[in-house]
Structures are given as structure tokens and as C-alpha cells.
Image (cartoon, helix red, strand yellow):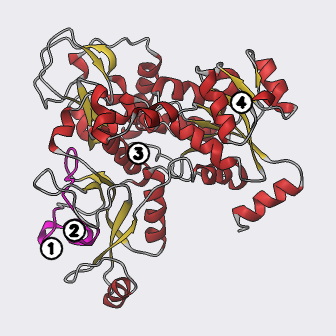
Amino acid sequence: MQHLAALLAQRQREGRPVTYALIGAGRFGTTVAAQTGQMPGLRLAVVCDLNLEAARAAWAAAGVPGASVVHARTPDAVADAVRSGRPVVTEDLEAAAGAPVEVVVEATGRPAAAARTALTAIAHGHHVVMVTVEADVLIGPLLRRQADRAGVVYTLADGDQPAVTKRLVDWATTLGYTIVAAGRGTRFFPEDAEGVPEEAFARYGYDPDLVARRRLNPKMYNSFRDGSKAQIEMCALANATGLVPDKRGMHEPSATIADLPRLFRLRSQGGLLSREGVVDLANAIAPDGRTELPNNIAIGVWVVVRTDNPLLHEDLGFYGLPAAVEGQTAALYRPYHLCGVETPYSILEAALLHQATCAPLPQPVAEVITVAKRDLEPGTILDGSGGRYVRGLIERAEIARAENLLPLGLADGVRLNVAVGKGQPIRWDMVAIDESDFLVRLRRQQDAAWAEAAR
């Protein structure tokens, strides 16, 4: 197979670069724009954001002077600008997603907007790179199915933890290793579970200049702190690989890199797991809840593999992988992930190879359920991932369905009908669901397809 770099160079020589639209010009999207600005053969064609200043900043990050950027307000105006090679900004999501490009990168961070973007792009025959993982864990299989029918690619974004971990899983599976566990690192303090958006940046130690300059979203960053984002990302990984959580919320032990192959193995072998083939988290914070462990993997990803061949197990350790002294497990890992920086790989794999970096399987195996952060009164309006009232925990899909548990992606802006205690899961029947809501209708379609397949 020809290497992506060679294919990209060929497109550049032919004068027909791969074109993409960027929907959402926050921190992630702006980094994608900056990265592609130094890649001949790949051209950013249009940036869409409700905040035009942010959209223009994404173009500036890509090295395009502001004076050359045009503002288009209609689909025809956007399309004309793209065809003529003029950099364009717009607030019109559907105009940008339907523009004459090959790939649409969805980076709004808002599930409803992400779903509309993906469906519009697919309807226009465009590949979709989905950055908004919250949408993927809610309706990813439905979007994947729509893309398959249209003959286009739907994929999560390289550089984010689910796709980066999936590459390690694919490598190990191809070589015949058993996947014992796969996951990402976290930095999770006991009090983080009750965190609120107003405190998120202070908890990270971010100064106001950084927050303003990079246009950071307090609710999104609170979802990082309260653990919801890690649960969401591991659900996306589960649904792309068939790996499942060993228990609700996963184990998330305190772990250094060297601890990974010892902790993430079966209990019968001295580990934590009741089964192999799971997703989990490795916490950089020590069991005392205060101290950060040395040699941790807080912003990295890992996969623990097993081999029955003693020579191969010996070699994995010999060549530098952490390996359990007793047993058959070893850990592959990357101590970093590069959000936005690596996303062009997914753009190019979709456009040039017609391949997904990381896409959900036809039927989900895991769900992110909604759990109360604190005692909640009837009438409370839930505020979704990263909010004040609820957080997400991963659960096996069949359990979530059997217990009628509300997906976290639908727990934003809905009224609670009953009192719910801190730590209690919230069921569908505990909230006032608007069946006409766009996301609810899409989720009902996905659930109906799952039920049909299960018959």
C-alpha cells in the first residue's frame, strides 16, 4: 500500500489538494487548522463557528492573513468561495458541512450540532471526522451506518485518546496478542467527581490569559476534571473494539507505567480483572488521593497484552516494554496524545485510503450512563457532561438497557421528575423526555436498530 505521504505529495503535484471543512473553531479545531497549514497537499477550505472571531483565528493559526478571509452567509456563497480557492468563514453549519469538500471535521463539542454536521456531510457525500466523542457514544453506530450506506467514511479523530489507543489495539491484534485491557491515563482526585464548571480552570491552574487566548470551554474542561470525559472516551474505544468495562465506571487504580501489566490482568493471576478484553483507566494520583505518582501515564494511552509464548514474553520485556515478572502480560504505551496535531491522519486516511482510523462497530457494547453528582431535587434541570449536577460512568450496553439507564448525552436540559440521591444512576423514566428532540429521535432510531438485530 502506498504511504500516505506519497499519496499526499501526488495530490499536491497534481494541483488537487485534499480539501476539508472545519466545523467548530475551539482549541481542538484551531490546532487542526494550524497543523494542516504546514501540510502541502491538504487544504482547509472553510471554517464554521458561531463566533466569527474564533473562525478567523483558526485561519490565522493556519497561516492565512485575515484580510484574505471572506465571510459567506449562504450555502451558495460558501460553495462559490470554496470553488475559487478563497478562504471563507461562515456561521451556517449546514452550508459549511455541505460545501464542495472531501472531508468534514466536526469539532464543536456539542452533540446536537455534531449530529447535524455529520448527517449533512454524509448526505452530501463527504467523509466525516468526528471530534465530538460525546456524539459518537450516543449515536455513533447510527452515524456509521448512514455513512456506510452513502459510501463514505465515518471516523473518530486521530490524536484523541480513543483513536490513539485503537491503533495500539490494532497493532497487537494483528500480531496475534490477546488484548487483556486497553485504556488511557487520568489525573483524578477524590473531590473531582463533584467538580463544577466555574472551578475547572482553577483546578487545572490555568491563568486567565491562556483561557481567553485558547478560548477554553469551562464545561468541557470540567468534564475532564469530573471524570466524565475519560468515561466517554473509553466508551468510544469499547464500541470501536468490542472491549467492555469490567465493572461500572471501570477500576481506575492508581498506577505507574510499570504497574500496568501487573494490575490489569486476571484476579487469579494477582490482578484486578474478572475477565480479559476490557477497557479501563490508570490514575496518576496515588491511593492517598493527594500525591502524584512518578512515572505515570496521565496524558498517555496503553494496552496490556498477553502471549502464551514464553520466548515472545521474554522479548517484549527485553526490548523495553513493562512486563509482569511472573505471568504472560506486557504493556504497550504512549506517554502522550496529540489532540488536533494528529487529526490530519484521519482526514487523509478517509480521503485517500477510504479507511476509518477508529469507527464504532455496528452494535454498541458500552454506554455512558447518567449519575447524580449530588443530591438532586425534583424539578432540577440537568446540565449534561461537565455540568454541576451529573457526571457519566461507563456500563455494559446490555445492563444499561436492562436497567433503563439514561445516556449522559441526553441528560442536558431535561427536567428531573423525582428526587435522586448522590451517586444514584438516573433512569429514562426519572426525567421529562421530549420525544420530538433531534437527538432523542436519533437515539430512538439507533435503539430500534439494536433491538431488531438482537431478535
Magenta stretch, main secondary structure, is loop
Q: CA distance from mark 3 to mark 4?
A: 25 Å
Q: Which residue is mark 1?
A: 269
Q: Secondary structure at mark 3?
A: helix
Looking at the image, tell me whether mark 2 or mark 3 is earlier in sequence order. Answer: 3
Q: Is residue 62 left or right of residue 164?
A: right
Bin the neighbour count of mark 2 within 10 Å (Cα to Cα): few under 14, some 14-19, many 20 and up: many
Kindly identify the residue that appears in the image at 13 percent across and 32 percent down.
Answer: 423
Q: Which region of the structure is painted magenta?
A: 247-272
| Callouts 2 and 3 close, C-beta under 8 Å | no
Residue at far top of view: 379
Q: Which residue is mark 4?
A: 124
Q: Secondary structure at mark 1?
A: helix
Q: Secondary structure at mark 4?
A: loop
Residue at far bottom of view: 311
Q: CA distance from mark 2 to mark 3?
A: 22 Å
Q: Which residue is mark 2?
A: 265
Q: Quadrant of the C terminus?
A: top left
Kindly identify the residue that appears in the image at 71 percent across and 35 percent down.
Answer: 125
Kindly identify the residue that appears in the image at 22 percent across and 57 percent down.
Answer: 292
The picture places residue 369, in percent across and down from the top left corner, at: 27, 33
Quadrant of the rendered image containing residue 124: top right
Q: Which residue is mark 3?
A: 236
Residue 228 is labelled as none
The picture places residue 170, in percent across and down from the top left corner, at: 48, 64
Choose between 297 and 15: the one closer to the eye.
Answer: 297
Q: Amino acid at mark 2?
A: Arg
Kindly identify the residue that appears in the image at 71 percent across and 27 percent down.
Answer: 98
Looking at the image, tell me whether mark 3 or mark 4 is earlier in sequence order. Answer: 4
Q: Secondary structure at mark 2?
A: loop
Q: Amino acid at mark 3?
A: Ala
Q: Amino acid at mark 4?
A: His
